[in-house]
Amino acid sequence: MPERATTAAIVALAIGSLLFMMSLYGRLGQGSGLLSVVGFVLVLAGAGTLIAGQKPLVFKAPHTAVIAVFALAAALHGIECFAEGPSEAGVAFYIWGMTPYALCLAISALGTLRAAPAIGGALALAVDVLVHREVFMVPQGSMSGLLLIFVPFWNNLVIVPAGTIVAWLILRRRSQSA
């Protein structure tokens, strides 16, 4: 992919994320709803451009580090969701909590982006560990449990993509200078 297209895709990701987050909190006034959709579309377009521009676009087994992060996340979310025994709500929360790690596995399966998603997944896991501590070990109030609903959303939209992109850029720059 030409350097210009890569830069445009990264700018689209950054602007889209910023628009979406600002709109989500109503910082952009009456147009927040529409601008959140525009931000989401920019994030998808930027990510799609980066992925589609990888040559060759072949699928491989995910990187070992990504599988390790996935396994740790599966254990953490399994403890959170099934400590009281299996339930329909527990299964739903487990699937929802694991979506950022499934995203990491999918990205890692792409031929040229194999190791970078390990960083995005590790950052998401760090956030999940902090949330686990906040919700189950030292809850600060009755609203702490809501973190379990919203953190996977932020992990999918911000933490995993940002961590993966930064790691990918670092790895790419390192390989170009070597």
Image (spheres, helix red, strand yellow):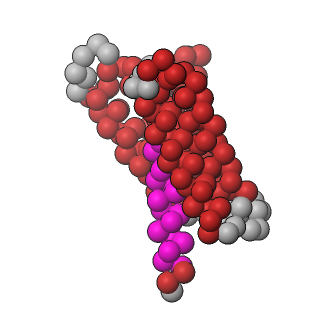
The magenta stretch spans which residues? 158-175
The residue at 59%/16% (across/down) is: 88
The residue at 49%/84% (across/down) is: 177
Give the side of residue 8 with respect to residue 166, left or right: right
Return the residue found at the far top: 142
The spot of residue 140 in percent (x, y) is 22, 21
Name the chief secondary structure element in magenta: helix
Q: Nearer the viewer, residue 49 or 11?
A: 11
Q: Is residue 69 above or below residue 26?
A: below
The spot of residue 143 in percent (x, y) is 32, 16
Give the side of residue 57 with respect to residue 158, left or right: right
The spot of residue 123 in percent (x, y) is 41, 49
The residue at 37%/45% (across/down) is: 126
Residue 148 within the segment the image draws in magenta: no
Q: How many marks?
A: 0
Q: Nearer the viewer, residue 153 or 45?
A: 45
The residue at 55%/55% (across/down) is: 10
Give the side of residue 170 with respect to residue 45, left or right: left
Q: Nearer the viewer, residue 115 or 11?
A: 11
The spot of residue 138 in percent (x, y) is 23, 27
Residue 169 appears in the rendering? yes
